[in-house]
Image (cartoon, rainbow, N blue to C red):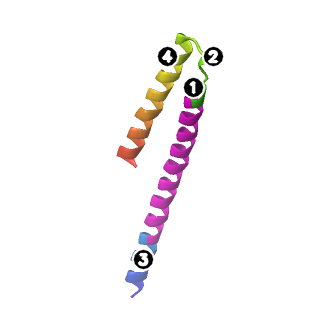
Amino acid sequence: QISGLGQAIRNSESSISMIQTTEGALNEVSNMLINLRQLAVHAANEGTNDEKMLQADQNEVENILSTLKNIARNT
């Protein structure tokens, strides 16, 4: 019975670690989605953007999407 309790504790610790990892990934994803929204709003303000600014925004969007894919694959 003591052995079973030890295993239950190890399983609980493993579950807590997995939840903490997932929580960190979700926080990072949330921040990236907020950033994507800000980039979209910035790009929509055509009067204040030139071609270089729009390209910089597009590059940032592509970097964020790439990072999101990596998080989805590895978390």
| Residue 45 percent location from the top left of the image | 61, 23
Residue 69 placed where, x, y %? Answer: 38, 39
Q: Are marks 1 and 3 in contact (CB under 8 Å)?
A: no
Amino acid tagged 1: Ala
Q: Residue at x 46, y 74 (%)?
A: 9
Q: Which residue is mark 2?
A: 47
Could you classify mark 4 by the number of other residues whose Cα lies within 10 Å: few (under 14), some (14-19), or many (20 or more)? few
Read off the residue under disc 1.
44
Whichever of callouts 4 and 1 sits on the residue coming sooner in the sequence is 1
Q: Choose mark 4 or mark 3, whichever is in front.
A: 4
Crowding at dot 1, Cα within 10 Å, few <14 / some 14-19 / many 20+, comes out as few
Residue sitting at x 42%, y 43%: 71
Find the residue positioned furthest to the left: 73
Please, what is the three-letter code of the amino acid marked with disc 3?
Answer: Ala
Mark before the other along the chain sequence, 2 or 3: 3
Identity, as a three-letter code, of the amino acid under mark 2? Gly
From the image, give the main secondary structure of the stretch colored magenta: helix
**How far apart are the alpha carbons under marks 2 and 1?**
9 Å
Q: CA distance from mark 2 to mark 3?
A: 61 Å
Tags 2 and 1 touching, CB below 8 Å = no
Circle 2 SS class: helix
Of labels 4 and 1, the one closer to you? 1
Residue at which label 4 appears: 55
Q: Which mark is residue 8?
A: 3
- Kind of element beneath mark 4: helix
Q: State the extent of the magenta-drawn residues as a range.
A: 12-40
Q: Amino acid at mark 4?
A: Gln
CA–CA distance in space, label 1 to label 3? 53 Å
The label shown at residue 58 is: none
Name the one closer to the observer, 44 or 64: 44
Determine whether the residue tagged by mark 1 lies in a helix, strand or loop. helix
Quick check: marks 4 and 3 in contact, CB under 8 Å? no
